[in-house]
Image (cartoon, helix red, strand yellow):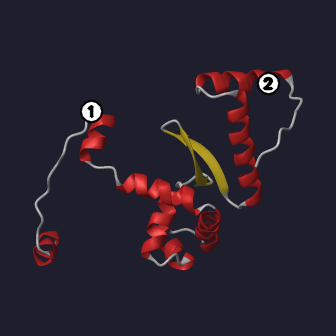
Amino acid sequence: MSQTITLRLPDTTADWLKSVARRNGRSINELGTVLFEEARRVSEFADIEFRAFGGERHACLKGDLQIWQVIAVAEDYGLDAEKTAAHFGFPVWRAQAALNYYEAFPEEIDSAIEENRAMDYEKLKRLFPQMKLVEVPAIASGEAQAEIR
């Protein structure tokens, strides 16, 4: 369900909205809806911001990782905030902020994790044609320790 709401924006803000919508191939309504939704989420969840990656906007810890990146690691720790925080060297409250966001929007985050896991060499090569595959021979753990010493 949605509602139509009319807003009066200062000319400079309206011009900016029109320009950004045009550059991104979106309607003013669509872009405005996305921006308002982001603003709502930022106001409701501590330490969250949105940034653009590859033309898409993603929820992130302020000044840091995308939420999906934190959650992908947190899954290995059973979504435990303390263990996840220790992994990243974060205070526990930062890991908890990511977990709180994930709890509210699991489909969004799970989709980003799935998309990342589906990325293989061929897909990356299309995005980064200069990329070269470097194969490193595996060595037994005892050999690695011997070489380090």
Question: Can residue 67 be seen in this snapshot?
Answer: no
Q: Residues within 10 Å of mark 2 (few under 14, many from 20)?
A: few
119 vs 84, nearest the viewer: 119
**Place of residue 62 in the rendered image (x, y in percent of width and height, measured from the top left):** 63, 54
**Place of residue 132 in the rendered image (x, y in percent of width and height, measured from the top left):** 20, 40
**Quadrant of the image containing the C terminus:** bottom left
Task: Give whichever of discs 1 and 2 has the lower sequence position.
Answer: 2
**Place of residue 81 in the rendered image (x, y in percent of width and height, measured from the top left):** 56, 76
Q: Amino acid at mark 1?
A: Pro
Question: Can residue 134 be seen in this snapshot?
Answer: yes
12 vs 101, nearest the viewer: 101
9 vs 96, nearest the viewer: 9
Give the residue at x 55% y 78%: 82
With 141 as the anchor, is 87 left or right in this view? right
Judging by the rendered image, the residue that carries numbered circle 1 is: 129
Q: Amino acid at mark 2?
A: Ala
**Number of numbered callouts drawn:** 2
Secondary-structure class at tag 2: helix
User: Where, by quadrant of the figure, is residue 45 drawn?
Assistant: bottom right
Judging by the rendered image, the residue that carries numbered circle 2 is: 14
Give the residue at x 68% y 34%: 31
With 131 as the anchor, is 78 left or right in this view? right
